[in-house]
Amino acid sequence: MRTLLGCLREADVPSSEPQRFRSLVIRVLRYLYKADRAELGALLAESVHRDWEVRMGESHADTINAAERLAACLLAQGDSKQARLMFERILQLRSSEYGDDHPDTLLAACNLGACLNRLEDFRAASLLNADTVRRCERRLGKRDRTTILATGNLAGSLLRLGEVEHALTLYRRIHQWHRRRSGENTLATLDAAAGIAISLHALGDHGAARAINADLLPRFERVAGKDYSATKNTRLRLEANLRALGCDEEADEVHGGIPKFLPSP
């Protein structure tokens, strides 16, 4: 894709046409973000966003989609401040174009809420995320994917603000939704289970947290690989659980592959 876009640019052929090609580019950018390839995703997204902004305008739906993919990749790379500026602009554009309660606007609000969590502006994030959940439930229903996304963002804000039991309740609700919707071993379901484990550890229930993370580690490795960010984070959480329980020998095994005390993937 990177080579193709470069050839199109050199030949002065617009990457903005036809619409099917734009849709393909957006799908590739979404995949790169999901696959922990945010650096490459940001390079591609920046290139197409700049081209589409010139050729179709800042407010075109696919220009905004490209901006959204760029912001997501920047956030994943750790450039949270630049991502915040982009997410704020995307929310403004979608609100102006579609209204505050349009599904695309609500999704933009979700993305900004996640960014505020990453910036550790948890008070502002909590206010935005709670409002987004209310509007999503009213407009889309409690079982809509965007509503669940907003609920996850709210749980993250509440957790960091010390409202851990409330966060745990939300994470359990999210986990049940993903498990029913997509099964036990999808990344979304595993991520939701990780939220439960984080909350339990914060509540001091290190044994329950350890049991969840011990179950998650081989499953994350099987589904996404040992170098996937969520796999690495699960190892760190499991080690913290074990050390909190005084199981230092088991904790020392965690970073040497799948520990002997866990089932093989």
Image: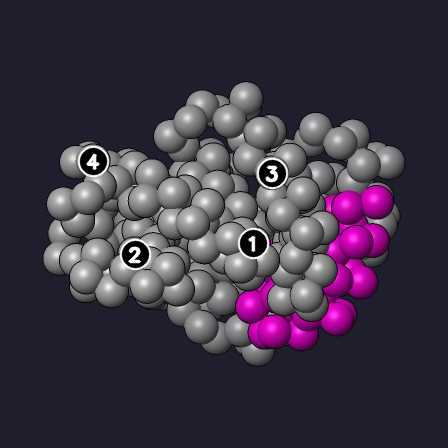
- Mark 1 and mark 2: Cα distance apart in space: 16 Å
Q: Nearer the viewer, mark 4 or mark 2?
A: 4
Identify the image quadrant of residue 163.
bottom right
Say what secondary structure mark 2 lies in.
helix
Q: Secondary structure at mark 4?
A: loop
Q: Which residue is mark 1?
A: 199
The answer to whether marks 4 and 3 mark residues whose Cβ atoms lie closer than 8 Å is no
* Other-residue count near label 2 (Cα within 10 Å), few / some / many at <14 / 14–19 / ≥20: many
**In this view, 61 is above or below 156:** above
Between 117 and 52, the one nearer to me in the picture: 117
The residue drawn where x is 53% and y is 73% is: 80
* Residue, disc 4: 263
Q: Is residue 41 visible?
A: no
Whichever of callouts 3 and 1 sits on the residue coming sooner in the sequence is: 3
Q: Measure the alpha-carbon separation of dots 3 and 1.
A: 10 Å
Image check: 24 left or right of 145? left
Task: Give the alpha-carbon distance from disc 4 to disc 2, as whole Å.
Answer: 14 Å
Above or below 117: residue 181? above
Q: Which residue carries the number 3 mark?
A: 172
